[in-house]
Amino acid sequence: MDKKRTLIKELAEKVGKKVVLYGWVDSVRDHGKVVFIDLRDRSGLVQLVGKEELKGLGMEDVVEIRGLVKKRPEKLVNPNLFTGKVEVEVEKHLLLNKAKELPLPLSGDGLDIEEKVRIKYRYLDLRRKRMASNIRLRSKVVQFIRNWLIEKEDFVEIETPILTKTTPEGARDFLVPARLQPGKFYALPQSPQQYKQLLMVAGFERYFQMARCFRDEDARADRAYGEFTQLDLEMSFVEQNDILELIEEMFTKMIETLFPEKKISKSPWPRISHKEAMSKYGSDKPDLRKNKKDKDELAFAWIIDFPLFVAQSKEDFFHGSGKAKFAPSHHMFTAPHPEDLKLLEKNPLRVRGLQHDLVLNGFEVGGGSIRISDPRIQEKVFELIGFSKKQKEQFAHLLEAFTYGVPPHGGIAPGIDRLLMVILGEPSLREVMAFPTTTSGKTSIMDAPSSASKKQLSELGIKLAKK
Ligand code: ASP
């Protein structure tokens, strides 16, 4: 008897051999003297055939199986199963862990089950075939990107702090009280924007990271509450075109490799000015699919030549920061189009920015820009968005860094969750995240946020206001 574990996917090569399998009972079919069980492990599903003693086993029990691998009669071959040509005749089974009746069914896509229940029992929901496959694909996508950027494009992967200072990307910050400096707060990064620009000053030239970004804004189908993941990257000595070409080539190859059934509808990807997008499609994220019913069509596009500023709105991070009427269209580190520099003074709303948005099937799946590297222009932009002296001081470190030899630089940050959601045609970002929060901001399973003890609060110097 083979002592080593055999994975279900390896069984096709083991006909006539005795094997040891481990996994979960996916289903039980009791035919009287014969019992059929589908056994599931991380690699697949296989049919077990056994005698009455298997009757004690129930769905989702964890078992060890010893048995003989047999070819299935030709007419019984299950073409839907990778291992459908074989079955295992059970000689001995061991129950490793008995499973209670599950609080939710795992068959089917699960989309009709109340989401609260799926998120509460996420560790079970992730056993669902569709979810397990989404999470595995996500890992492959990330690995593809890592290999491409590091091995082919000479990038360095660098982690940046999570406990940091606010990075104004236009959303509300999450604050973390600082025990060592009562009354002061860290902010969780809305993106690693400032750090990646500082890494360019540091001379790395090509940086990326799978960056967790934290934004306290309401959830939507295409926006998770609280946190999400970006492929954050930044490059020195490049023009906008270099960034667009790098992403276009990498994602095209990634889709060809990992999603061969998908078809990119147009290559090279159309590049459309913001003005044209608005006048032709009435949207800055147009859906350019030829056939919107085709679930395998992917229509990428670049939107460029955005206005550098938009009129400030009440919800704006910058609102109330001064008398200014402008807010950055992307963020305040985006460089003005060189041809429009002269308009900065007289007519800021007509200045175009070197911003680029990546659009896929009507969703914005990434944004970035060439950055301002001239401290005088950065000052001017601060002024135009109405920064007070104090607010400017919050960014003094960046302006100072730019006085010590900053290369021209720019980057982009495609959202990994959103990209996957669109490629896989899932109705929400949460379908491609292992442990998402609910729309009301509760975490999976553990149900955070939760109260803190008196002791914790007093250490932090925090008193809660009575509600
Ligand atoms: N930090 C930006 C964002 O999160 C992306 C970038 O400009 O590279 O949208």
Image (cartoon, helix red, strand yellow):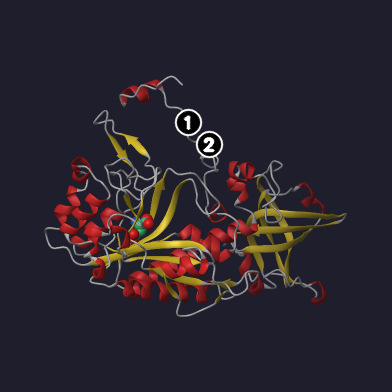
At x 54%, y 58%, the residue is 135
Q: Where in the figure is residue 428, as x and y percent of width and height?
A: 57, 54
Q: Give the residue number, with chain letter if any, for mark 2.
A: 447
Q: Give the residue number, with chain letter if any, for mark 1.
A: 450
At x 33%, y 22%, the residue is 458
At x 46%, y 27%, the residue is 451
Q: Where in the figure is residue 101, as x and y percent of width and height?
A: 72, 42
Left or right side of 393 for 159: right
Q: Is residue 15 visible?
A: yes
Q: Where in the figure is residue 131, as x and y percent of width and height?
A: 60, 56
Q: Are marks 1 and 2 in contact (CB under 8 Å)?
A: yes
Tell me the amino acid under the disc marked 1: Ser
**Residue at the far front in the pictured view:** 346
Q: Which mark is residue 240?
A: none
Left or right side of 191 for 406: left
| Residue 467 position (above or below residue 254) | above
**Residue at the far right in the pictured view:** 32
Quarter location, residue 241 = bottom left
Q: Quadrant of ligand 1?
A: bottom left
Q: Residues within 10 Å of mark 1 (few under 14, many from 20)?
A: few
Q: Is residue 207 visible?
A: no
**Residue at the far left in the pictured view:** 404
Left or right side of 130 for 59: right
At x 31%, y 27%, the residue is 460
Element assignment for label 2: loop
